[in-house]
Image: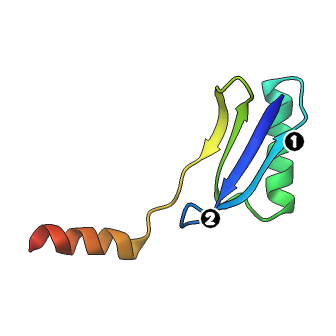
């Protein structure tokens, strides 16, 4: 059994559901298809086996404002 979780840029959960698949490859294929259908491919997501190991993920993208804010804080 696999699971897919999708996050928005603020780390709020957009989707968190089981994913029916028998193999890692099938979980990736089904997960990517679902992400594409929902227009979530650019979001942060993880597809993982119910035992806990990570099969595939997409990390959050840096926010320019956050990076600039950190840079300014370091300069003060």
**Rendered location of residue 6, percent (x, y):** 69, 54
First along the sequence among labels 2 and 1: 2
Which residue is at 80% across, 32% downward?
2
Is 47 left or right of 75, judged from the image as shown?
Answer: right
Nearer the observer: mark 2 or 1; the answer is 2
Asked which secondary structure carries label 1, the reply is helix
Please rate how many residues cluster around mark 2, counting C-alpha atoms within 10 Å: few if below 14, some from 14 to 19, many from 20: some
Q: In this view, does 49 lie above or below 42?
A: above
Asked which secondary structure carries label 2, the reply is loop
Which residue is at 56% across, 66% downward?
9
The image quadrant that residue 37 belongs to is bottom right
Which residue is at 91% across, 35% downward?
20
| Residue carrying label 2 | 8
**Rendered location of residue 19, percent (x, y):** 85, 39
Which residue is at 81% across, 47% downward?
17
The image quadrant that residue 36 belongs to is bottom right
């Amino acid at each position: 059994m696999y699971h897919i979780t999708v996050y928005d840029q603020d780390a709020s959960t957009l989707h968190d559901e089981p994913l029916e698949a028998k193999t890692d490859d099938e979980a990736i294929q089904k997960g990517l298809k679902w992400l594409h259908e929902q227009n979530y491919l650019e979001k942060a997501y993880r597809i993982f086996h119910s035992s806990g190991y990570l099969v595939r993920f997409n990390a959050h993208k840096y926010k320019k404002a956050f990076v600039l804010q950190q840079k300014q804080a370091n300069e003060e």
